[in-house]
């Protein structure tokens, strides 16, 4: 009795220490996860010069823009006009920031001369002016455009709009195909009388998990080129589906083997076909593993880089990770634009996680402990 009481006292006295250690580990892990996201977010509002000078400093140049100086420049070949001069013939004053990337034709504003005071509308190339000299509507417009400069430039110069849509299509359609085909294959392997054949097929599928995209990228490119599917969305989605199936089939098959066979037999006795039993019984009961496979597949496809880089040469078929990489070149790196693009790529994942946090947790846990 005395020994048991002493043991209980030791456990009681050590439990606060254990809790403290657990909290320290969890808080440290949370900081390791959250701080890089926070740094990426506020860095997306910094100019390229700020990121090079002090990568950890808080943003300043893009927000403190009320007294920014601009230089009037002439229209030239290296100035991309946001309008068609043949359709819109109104005269404009082209100004370039002397504070943010001066001389690189990156931060430009095209001001209608009819909206400007005469003393500003008459300025010539080489003359300077400050934002505070402009009318209030233009000051507000230029101020907001300066704050969101990295995001505007990322969308305009990196074509992130179409790449964002492509990433959604690749992740959504490929994940749907992976779930559909993996459930059908798993149903056949786990609930149909093909025991020996199922073992052989499961062995082949298991080998598929050992094959990476990097190891077969060249043969894959040659194969898709021979059938005309390179640089097409359907070709990319077919490859994503093929590489996502092995793991999805293994998870789904293991889950289905834990479902009682009596449910399927009862459905057959009631006259149900294989398709009806699959649709009405198997699919609803496999909701946890469907959710687990969806998470693994969609996140993997959303973040995948190499496949689209090799198979897609047109801007219309590239995905968001390739768009982020496009801001790096031999001539320099637009780090502010990259941070903005990374934030754009991260926000959808964070929103989905925050909305479906409890559902995702239940699905993963249920899929792990089933059987």
Image (cartoon, rainbow, N blue to C red):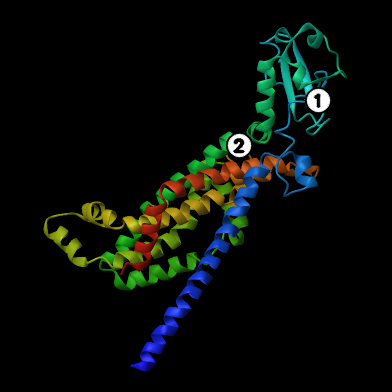
Q: Residue 133 or 3: which is nearer the viewer?
A: 3
**SS for tag 1?**
strand
Residue 214 in the image: x percent, y percent?
61, 59
147 to the left or right of 125:
left
Say if residue 320 shows up in the picture: yes
Q: Residue 64 or 370: which is nearer the viewer?
A: 64
N-term-proximal mark, 1 vs 2:
1
- Please name the residue that numbered disc 1 is placed on: 69
- Toward the right, the furthest residue is 126
Q: Are marks 1 and 2 in contact (CB under 8 Å)?
A: no
Q: Quadrant of residue 329?
A: top right
Q: Quadrant of residue 148?
A: top right
Say if residue 231 shows up in the picture: no
Residue at 49% over, 42% down: 168
Residue 296 in the image: x percent, y percent?
46, 56
261 to the left or right of 370:
left
- Toward the left, the furthest residue is 270
Q: Quadrant of residue 339?
A: top right
Residue at 77% over, 26% down: 67
Residue 330 in the image: x percent, y percent?
79, 45
Mark 1 vs mark 2: in front: 1
Q: Reply above or below: 324 against 36.
A: above
| Number of other residues with Cα within 10 Å of mark 2, as a class: few under 14, some 14 to 19, many 20 or more | many
Q: Give the alpha-carbon distance from disc 1 to disc 2, as whole Å.
A: 29 Å
Residue 82 in the image: x percent, y percent?
68, 21
**SS for tag 2?**
helix
Screen quadrant of the C terminus: bottom left
Residue at 48% over, 44% down: 351
Q: Reply above or below: 191 against 290.
A: below
Q: Which mark is residue 160?
A: 2
Screen quadrant of the N terminus: bottom left
């Amino acid at each position: 009795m005395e020994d048991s009481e002493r043991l209980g006292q030791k456990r009681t006295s050590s439990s606060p220490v254990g809790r403290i250690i657990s909290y320290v580990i969890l808080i440290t892990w949370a900081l390791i996860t959250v701080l890089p996201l926070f740094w990426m977010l506020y860095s997306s509002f910094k100019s390229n010069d700020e990121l090079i000078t002090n990568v950890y400093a808080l943003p300043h140049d893009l927000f403190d823009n009320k007294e920014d100086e601009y230089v009037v420049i002439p229209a030239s070949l290296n100035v991309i006009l946001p309008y068609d001069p043949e359709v819109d013939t109104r005269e404009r004053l082209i100004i370039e920031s002397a504070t943010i990337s001066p001389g690189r034709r990156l931060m430009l504003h095209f001001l209608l001369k009819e909206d400007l005071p005469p003393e500003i509308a008459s300025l010539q190339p080489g003359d300077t002016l400050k934002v505070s000299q402009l009318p209030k509507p233009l000051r507000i417009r230029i101020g907001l455009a300066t704050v969101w400069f990295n995001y505007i430039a990322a969308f305009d110069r990196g074509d992130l709009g179409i790449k964002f849509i492509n990433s959604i299509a690749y992740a959504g359609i490929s994940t749907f195909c992976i779930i559909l085909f993996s459930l059908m294959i798993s149903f056949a392997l786990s609930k149909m009388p093909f025991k020996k054949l199922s073992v052989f097929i499961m062995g082949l599928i298991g080998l598929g998990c050992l094959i990476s995209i990097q190891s077969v990228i060249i043969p894959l490119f040659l194969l898709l080129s021979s059938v005309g599917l390179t640089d097409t969305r359907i070709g990319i989605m077919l490859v994503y589906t093929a590489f996502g199936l092995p793991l999805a089939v293994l998870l789904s098959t293991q889950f289905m083997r834990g479902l009682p066979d009596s449910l399927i037999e009862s459905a057959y006795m009631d006259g149900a076909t294989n398709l009806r039993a699959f649709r009405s019984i198997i699919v609803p009961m496999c909701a946890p593993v469907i959710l687990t496979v969806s998470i693994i597949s969609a996140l993997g496809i959303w973040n995948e880089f190499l496949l689209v880089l090799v198979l897609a040469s047109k801007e219309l078929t590239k995905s968001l990770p390739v768009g982020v990489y496009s801001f790096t070149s031999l001539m320099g790196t637009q780090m502010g634009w990259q941070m903005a693009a990374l934030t754009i790529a991260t926000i959808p994942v964070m929103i989905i996680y925050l909305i479906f946090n409890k559902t995702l947790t239940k699905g993963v846990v249920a899929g792990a402990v089933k059987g």
